[in-house]
Image (cartoon, rainbow, N blue to C red):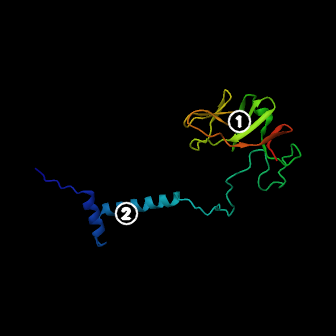
Amino acid sequence: MTDVQTRTEAATHHECASASGATSTRRCILVGAGALGAGAVLAACGTDSSGTNPNGTDFDTNPAPAGSTAAGGTGDGDTGDSGGSATVLVAASKVAVGGGVITNDLVVTQPTEGTFKAFSKVCTHQGCEVSEIADGQIICRCHNSFFSIKDGAPTSGPAQQPLTETKVELDGDNVVKAA
């Protein structure tokens, strides 16, 4: 019968820690290489909170919606469609009567023909983004909160506060933020 000796992880760690360097075992080298690799991966995944892109430009935490003038544009906010300086949120034709559209930052609704409303797309329950609009309701599927497309008020679910409203108006064929 052969006697087999086993080592615990603590014994291996102690052996690596007390090695003088001249007699490193293969296990110690592999453990050290793995730790070094894990450190490199974690360092690469870190974030810099300085607020500057590697190319030297600042991050924009509130980018301009599609169809509006972004940074580097004419600077007057004119989209070329209406001659005004309002920020275009969505084409009015894309917002169904009794429904709505979820944009980058807002939910734009049309509760009755010709009446447009806009609300934050961040649910007031726990900060999830609303995910759909159906049957006259703005719906957050994270915890099944429902909000009215008329005023953003909660109609069911755990949310107790209404969605924050943003004033909008019709400018030509577009729904824009009100001045």
Q: Secondary structure at mark 2?
A: helix
In the displayed image of the protein, which residue is found farthest to the left? 1
Say which residue label 1 marks: 151
Other-residue count near label 2 (Cα within 10 Å), few / some / many at <14 / 14–19 / ≥20: few
Q: Does residue 73 appear left or right of residue 165 in this picture?
A: right
Other-residue count near label 1 (Cα within 10 Å), few / some / many at <14 / 14–19 / ≥20: some
Q: Secondary structure at mark 1?
A: loop
Q: Does residue 43 appear left or right of residue 72 in this picture?
A: left
* Residue at 82%, 39% in the rendered image: 174
* Residue at 18%, 56% in the rendered image: 5
* Nearest to the observer: residue 74 or residue 21: 74
- Does residue 98 appear anywhere in the picture? yes
- Say which quarter of the image contains residue 32: bottom left
Find residue 18 and name its label: none
Expressed as whole percent of the image width and height from the top left, the position of residue 115 reads: 79, 33
* Residue at 69%, 52% in the rendered image: 62
Say which residue label 2 marks: 32
* Nearest to the observer: residue 48 or residue 22: 48
Q: Does residue 61 appear left or right of residue 80 in this picture?
A: left
In the displayed image of the protein, which residue is found farthest to the right? 83
In the displayed image of the protein, which residue is found farthest to the top? 135
Distance CA(mark 1)–CA(mark 2): 60 Å
- Say which quarter of the image contains residue 50: bottom right
* Nearest to the observer: residue 132 or residue 20: 132
Expressed as whole percent of the image width and height from the top left, the position of residue 114 reads: 81, 31
Expressed as whole percent of the image width and height from the top left, the position of residue 24 reads: 30, 67
Q: Earlier in the sequence, mark 1 or mark 2?
A: 2
Q: Nearer the viewer, mark 1 or mark 2?
A: 1
Amino acid found under the numbered disc labelled 2: Gly
- Say which quarter of the image contains residue 145: top right
- Does residue 24 appear anywhere in the picture? no
